[in-house]
Amino acid sequence: MPRPRQFDEERVLSAVQAAFWDKGYAGTSLEDLLVASGLGKGSLYGAFGDKKSLFLRVLRMYDEANDQMLRRRLEHAERGVDVIRGFMTGPVRDPSGEQARRGCLLANTAMELSVSVAEVAAEARHSYASTTAVLADAVRRAQREGDVAPRLDPDVTARAVLAGQLGLIVLGRVGQDPAALSAMAEALLAGLLPAS
């Protein structure tokens, strides 16, 4: 009969996720994972599988949390356009630039692994498709509310907003000036979301 786990699974996954986010997949050693989790190798791999399985689990956990957060924002936002603005400016809001330099776990991972790890490419496609669908709903709502031109195609606009945000994430990772990133975000929004 297997023994019950003697650790908080959610805390362990969160700590491991932070380690991967800080160092990337290749840069995160087994020792890093053991230190972050507070577990021994047998307990860590016994509970979550090998490094790749553990990484894919925390990546999916990250993606699901972001998807739920974006959906909640759209549900509770005063205006649809606010959700789109928040999505675009979110990665560049921190004036210190620390958040921008850390980037997005999914975007970082997609750049590092999507060519060599099919599961990562599939997860990125799935997550970005879900994000695009929510953003397209936000564009439709913004059109109904009169904040965005009705001539825009919501799906095309949503994909362009996602592409713009990903560009800002990459520029933030390489240390672009936070004020310049904010100005770029505003310019992208002005171009992508013309008023009615």
Image: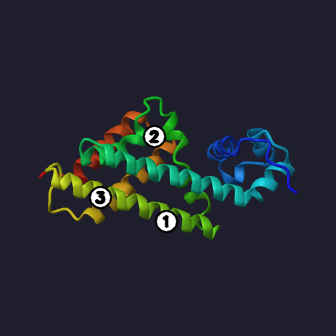
Nearer the camera: disc 2 or disc 1: 1
* Residue 8 pos. (x, y %): 71, 41
Q: In 3D space, how far apart are the residues under numbered discs 2 and 1 (Cα atoms)?
A: 29 Å
Q: Is residue 60 left or right of residue 16?
A: left
Taking the view exactly as shown, the residue that stands out farthest to the top is: 96
Label 2, residues with CA under 10 Å away: few <14, some 14-19, many ≥20: some
Where does residue 146 sit, x and y in percent of width and height?
13, 50
Circle 1: residue type: His
- Labels 1 & 3 near each other (Cβ < 8 A): no
Is 194 placed above or below 14 here? Answer: below
Residue where numbered disc 1 is placed: 126
Residue occupying the point 25% across, 47% down: 81
> Helix, strand or loop at disc 1?
helix
Q: Is residue 106 above or below residue 186?
A: below
Residue that protrudes farthest toward the front in the picture? 1
Cα distance, mark 1 to mark 3?
17 Å
In the rendered image, residue 111, in percent from the top left (x then y), is placed at 56, 58
| Identity, as a three-letter code, of the amino acid under mark 3 | Asp
Q: Quadrant of residue 60?
A: bottom right
Q: Secondary structure at mark 3?
A: helix
x then y, percent, for residue 30: 80, 49
Q: Which numbered dot is residue 176?
A: 2
Q: Residue at x 55, y 64 (%)?
A: 123
